[in-house]
Amino acid sequence: MNRDRTRLDGRTALVTGGEGFLGRKWTAALVDAGASVVSVDVLPATDPDDADPRVRREQVDITDPGALAALATRLVDAGLSVDVLVNNAAIDAPVLSTGLADGDRLETFSLERWHTELSVGLTGAFLCARTFGPPMAARGRGAIVSIASDLGLVAPDQRLYRVDGVAEALQPVKPVTYSVIKTAVIGLTRYLATYWAEQGVRANALCLGGVARDQDPVFVERVSERIPLGRMADEDEYGDAMVFLCSDASSYMTGACLVLDGGRTAW
């Protein structure tokens, strides 16, 4: 057979954090593969004039079980069954051209921020799986893809974020929540994969390295030196991997981490 098993025609994918950078990339890749996409975000649409009929935008707080239940009802009423769940929503402290944003050290990391970031990145993924996974299991088919990171596999190298002339106790660091959440997302993925295996629902994680996006040049150079391929990812290098995990092309793959990090975790 020459059937393209990467096609997603007739399927509906729900992407959380859909208005963020990666969320928009996932949406574009899935639509290109033939899927309809429900883009879910707590923020309003970044492009309200986008009238693509294949994309339905929903402003929903995924940390609110009631809001998720209401979303599920709206989708059923609209005749939509979620075939693919992409757990993408997260709060991150990105490295910008001016340095690391909100790189609070462990000693000063607030409990409020801890709870907020775990609520979105981990609890939100659990709640979405709890909401949209059972109907998949009832239908005997589905795919859950959760966005993890190379920092879910290894610890952050805090030397990447150092700033010359700053006292040691004040040096910026990758926040503790990022590693904790991305590691836990991998654990959630394995749990879901075995929990619904007999019902035909697959769960996998994408462990991504950093994408080159106008970061501090010193940071980019430092990171690139630690990657066997010698560079960060281009912004369009991850979409095919997402389609692979959502489609029948990965039909015998579950409970796994697909690592796209330029070889960083191989060193």
Image: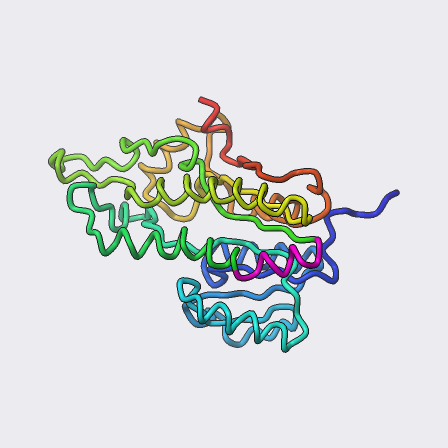
126 shown above or below 261: below
Q: Is residue 237 visible?
A: no
Image x and y of residue 234, in percent: 51, 43
Residue 95, image x, y percentages: 33, 46
Magenta stretch: dominant SS?
helix
61 to 200, vertically: above or below: below
State the residue at coordinates (18%, 38%).
171
Whether residue 242 is visible, yes or no, is yes
Q: Nearer the viewer, residue 206 or 63?
A: 63
Q: Quadrant of the C terminus?
A: top left
The quadrant the N terminus occupies is: top right
Residue at the image position 19 percent from the left and 51 percent from the top: 110
Q: Residue at x 27, y 31 (%)?
A: 159
Q: Which quadrant holds residue 250?
A: top right
In the rendered structure, does residue 139 fall within the stretch colored magenta? yes
Range of residues picked out in magenta: 131-140
